[in-house]
Amino acid sequence: MFGEIFLCQFPLTSGAAGKIRPVLVLFDLGPDAIVCRVTSVLRTGPLDVTLADWQAAGLLKPSVARLDRIVTAERSIFIRRLDTLSAADLAAVRTAWNAHMKL
């Protein structure tokens, strides 16, 4: 599932229900998945990964994966699968994660 893009109701940081938006699956946990927000609000931060092949991933606008906006979500809340990131975008996500998410 790593690299798949789905539509889901991504929660706000307050815990309230947010709007329907694309998410990127980072880790498959069986009935759950760890996902990050995908947004067309472009900014540059160390955990923002610009998706070069956004159209091939089924996204409507140029987008970034926000690795600093992650949640564990039940896969049952995924509304629809869009597509999968390209190999280059997957590599960029993996590189950013490994460079900045160390314990």
Image (spheres, rainbow, N blue to C red):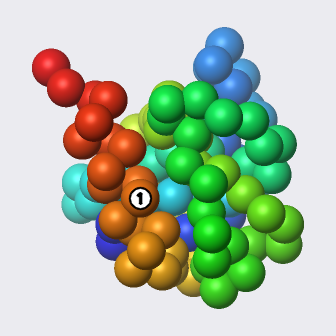
Residue at screen point 62% across, 54% down: 50
Q: Which residue is mark 1?
A: 92
Residue sitting nearer the eye, 31 or 51: 51
Q: Is residue 93 visible in the rendered structure shown here?
A: yes
> In the shown orientation, is residue 73 left or right of residue 100?
right
Identify whether 68 is placed above or below 98: above
Percent from the top left, x then y, of residue 59?
74, 72
Res 51 → quadrant: bottom right
Identify whether 97 is placed above or below 26: above
Indicate the amino acid at tag 1. Ala
> In the shown orientation, is residue 64 left or right of residue 86?
right
Percent from the top left, x then y, of residue 57?
62, 79
Q: Is residue 3 visible in the rendered structure shown here?
A: no
Residue sitting nearer the eye, 42 or 25: 42
> In the shown orientation, is residue 85 left or right of residue 96?
right
Percent from the top left, x then y, of residue 85?
50, 75
Q: Residues within 10 Å of mark 1 (few under 14, many from 20)?
A: some
Residue at screen point 35% across, 65% down: 91
**Which quadrant: the C terminus?**
top left
What secondary structure is marked by label 1? Answer: helix
Q: Residue furthest top?
A: 14
> In the shown orientation, is residue 28 left or right of residue 85?
left
Residue at screen point 78% across, 43% down: 42
Residue sitting nearer the eye, 41 or 34: 41
Residue at screen point 47% across, 68% down: 89
Residue sitting nearer the eye, 66 or 15: 66
Percent from the top left, x then y, of residue 26?
36, 54
Identify whether 84 is placed above or below 20: below
